[in-house]
Image (cartoon, rainbow, N blue to C red):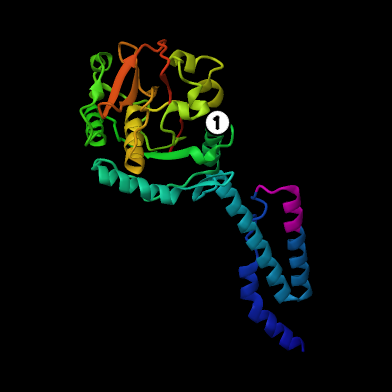
Amino acid sequence: MREAREKRNLNTTPCLEMARPRRGAVEELKLTLDERQHLGDLLDLAKSKEQSGDIPEAIRLYTQVKEEAEAIKAHQEQEKRGTKTESILSLEGKEINLEQELKYWQDFYEKQGIDWIELPKEIKLTKEQKEQLEAGARALCPEGEYDKLKLLIIPANLADTGERYAQIHEKMSQGYAATFEGSNFTEDGSFSGLKNKSNELRLILTKDIQNLADDELYKSTKGKSVDDLEADGSIFKTSGLRGLDIATYLVQQREYFERTEKHLDEDGYTWLTEHERPASGRVPSAGWFPDFSQLSFDAYSPDGHHDDLGCRLSSSLVI
């Protein structure tokens, strides 16, 4: 009997050595008091079983300690990096799936002949990024009207030079009458004179609204100057929302037209705030002239007020 037990112990020794957690494996983890107590109790029990000769049970307990410690470590590393998610937004029944949206926008840019950009094969968000987008969605939809949300994926370097800005305008206005450009807009350099505040890959949440008057939040910006929008206590400061740049507006305008055969801002105009200010200090605006089937761009002083001029609000996340 003794010889059989010793032989069995010799056969299980390599398994026992493999099952034991390495020295310090548990101690180096940042554990809660409950986790440390739990793993400590398991280790003590495993050592007791080993000393009493119950090697199979010792192996099982050591293995359990290793597996639980590795799971805790993996969870901590994942939280440090940020939890990855496929569905970027899920609010009150409105879900935006990032994988599906990425494919949609890849096809859109390819169809438009935008061949100087490259979207990533996948976009995954950290927990913090997801929370940032959800906060933006709530700011855009204070009454819970999440069905109005629209996600735009704006590639890096879409309009990072004057030449590309002019190309974006040409591509996104194909089939329209020649764009109307007001004198202030042309004096500031027209499309080739524009400089975006950001040219990085961005996820932009905005609303799928044809005219500003069709949405209470957007309607509340009508008649306000850019100075009003940016003042302390204003919507930009209290909500974290901003406007759009012209490249993003051209993208949204074209996508909306191809999907609905209608145009954004047939009734009224929008400030386009996300540019570096030119020497004049003016801020661009845009709209659609339905009587002439053309886009319209101009620029005004940031303290200018116009009853039909408001702002398409958005929440932007740089990836």
Q: Main secondary structure of the magenta part?
A: helix
What is the x, y in percent for residue 130? 53, 41
- Left or right of residue 155: residue 147: right
Residue at image x 51%, y 41%? 147
Looking at the image, is 193 positioned above or below residue 200? above
Front residue of 277 and 293? 293
- Residue 34 percent coordinates (x, y): 76, 51
Residue 259 x, y percent position in the rendering: 35, 43
Tell me the magenta residue range.
Answer: 30-40
Q: Residue at x 76, y 76 (%)?
A: 53
Q: Residue at x 49, y 51 (%)?
A: 86
Name which residue type carries label 1: Ala
Q: Residues within 10 Å of mark 1 (few under 14, many from 20)?
A: many
* Residue wearing tag 1: 139
Q: Please provide percent x and percent y for residue 68.
A: 66, 60
Residue 19 in sight here:
yes
Residue 118 lies in quadrant: top left
